[in-house]
Image (spheres, rainbow, N blue to C red):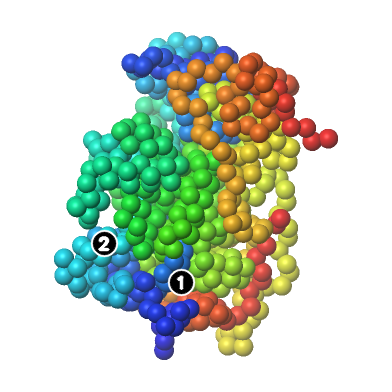
Amino acid sequence: MLKWPVISRCPMTDPLLDVRDLCVDFGASATIVGVNFDLAAGEVLGLVGESGSGKTTLARAILKLLPARGSVRFMGQDLLTCSAAALRTRRRELQIVFQDPLASLNPRMTVGEGIGEPLQIFEPRLGARARRLRVGALLERVGLSGAMAERYPHEFSGGQCQRVAIARAMILRPKLLICDEIVSSLDVSIQGQIVNLLIDLQREAAMAVLFISHNLAVVRHLSQRVMVMYLGRVVEIAPCDALFATPKHPYTRVLLAAVAGISSAPRVPTPPAPPAALQPSPVTVREPSPVAVLKPSSVMVLERSPVTAPEPSRPARLLVQGCAYRDRCAFALPLCADREPPLIEVGAGHWAACHRSHETLIPLSFGS
Amino acid sequence: MTPTLNVQDLRIAFSHRAGNIEAVDGVSFQIGPAECVGIVGESGSGKTQIFMAAMGLLAGNARATGSVRFEGAELLAAHPTALNRIRGSKLTMIPQDPMTCLTPHLKIGVQLAEVMVTHRGTTWRDARSYAARMLERVHVAEPRRRLNQYPHELSGGLRQRVMIAMSVLCEPSLVIADEPTTALDVTVQAQVMELLRALRGEFGMALALISHDLAVVAGLADRILVMYAGRIVEVAAAAELFRRPRHPYTAELLKCMPTIAGPRAVRLPTLAGQPPRPGEVLQACAFAPRCSRAADRCRMERPELVGPADAQVACHFPLSHD
């Protein structure tokens, strides 16, 4: 059975990034379990999932910041097996922006030195003056002033630091930018500014972006495709609109419902769930239980089983068979305990790893 | 009835080599018994410092003037011994970062039981079994086993549950929750908010819910205070604030909230400009430079917070919704 999504949008060219059967183990526990996906040049792929689902680990494995098995082909070269010299040249095209903007900048370097350092390393022939000009121009581009190059990171606000971190990642004009929760620590009013800046830069440079976030609303606004991870596995990957309109994996539905539950206006009653429950499938061996109705305000659905939420350190990670999500799943069947569902195509470019993904689910409604 | 927390003309200034920095600039409000008040503002707006002053936890270079009364007793001038009788029992705090607020080298059970032993004078044995029951109450699986674990063995969501359990151990009158869900996942956020709601119903405590995110306080708060640059700019009943914001800043904040419903915007709506830098002397309306409604008067004269207790606004030209 074909186990990974072949998204051949550009059949003539290879994808920019092609990750296959990627596994990362910390000691005895597997953190990333056989992840497969690809990323085309200039594409924005959103990556969501809760903490412990392996989002950051996946990012680090792609950058070869930690040991991994499988293959990570970037621009046709496997980063996991290539030589140190080859890795070094490839990394130039592969940059990351971290969550905590202040902690990721060197406090003893001026912002200008920090942004210019990659140039010093990769373009040593560039003179100090030319380097300063490039840094100044880029600072202006990310919405700061060139004069700010002389300042130190602690003199900047969180949002400004994140602009600096983005500038540092962009100075070498990478082909792929990994953004690991870059707006999570920022104020709501600043988040939009940073996201808009990223969208502009991405379009200008036709750069691919892997945008990791637990904020689904932000991911929805800027991604072309979205990938959902759960306990180290990809459980769903789909074009953005399809994922939000017709999520196929129960976990994705719970995630979406949780966001809708939190951000709904106060005391405005949520519309009652449509009476239709999950359609029983021909192969269903038992009637779906009443809990199988996912209500829009699915906070209740979540609250019902908080104790069974698998902790990253719990044996769910070491699970040898069955679906990793079945403990929390309102739709689980006996089959789910026996066999891990493969990632299968359920729509155009829409892949889900659920034994029941082909069944009709009641539509989620997020109110107005 | 005596309000649970009564803050009057509170000013907090930090002395700094560049001069005094005013973090909180004349803030007055009350929190009634069993009331849930949301305090919303950007980082640097002073929302956390108000409650740091109440808890006697201001930094060494800070000076607070005005009055903060907790159940009638003045907190600002209180001796640490007097404060210690209140802090952790009647007045508790759920901090933002559950990763760093638990002592790393003490087991969860010790940290929880200590609260009971210190404030209630119970035996360690009783305190431990009470702690276990409380952990169960906040939906921590296998509470007995958790008591023997260290903080690093727990996930973020679990640690926040432990902190919540700790905050309600002595049946407090007021719990201050400072960004209780910011460090957590959306699914866990929903659970934690639901838990706070349930505990509030059960223990009848007042709740001060501090957040930079309107969406987080939306579902729980009775009243919402919006802060900007050290001052309260709007006070309104929660539902009213969402439906009919009156201060332009509140209205802009509401527009900035990305949603998962509706059409996908190409660009996210943003609030232009930056909030004023700390220490900047503000004679006029602090929001005027970012405000689309600002007129000359806004740049000359500072608007005062006016109106009844549940519908106040500090703006010369508030939005009307007639």
The local secondary structure at tag 1 comes to: strand
Marker disc for residue A91: 2
Residue B123 seen in the current view: no
Camera-side mark, 1 or 2: 2
Residue B277 seen in the current view: yes
Q: Chain of mark 1?
A: A
Position of the C terminus of chain A, as image quadrant, is bottom right
Instruction: Decide: is B31 above or below A88.
Output: above
**Residue drawn 31% across the image and 72% down it:** A75
State whether discs 1 and 2 lie on one chain: yes
**Residue drawn 36% across the image and 63% down it:** A175
Image quadrant in which you'd find residue A321: bottom left
Left or right position of A79 against A256: left
- Indicate the position of residue B236 as horizontal and vertical percent values: 69, 31
- Mark 1 — residue? A235
User: B189 and B82: which one is in front?
Assistant: B189
Left or right position of A130 against B268: left
Q: Residue flagged by tag 1: what amino acid is it? A: Val
Q: Residue flagged by tag 2: what amino acid is it? A: Arg
User: A323 and B239: which one is in front?
Assistant: B239
Q: Earlier in the sequence, mark 1 or mark 2?
A: 2
- Indicate the position of residue A194 as horizontal and vertical percent values: 48, 47
How many neighbours does mark 1 have within 10 angstroms: few (below 14), some (14-19), or many (20 or more)? many
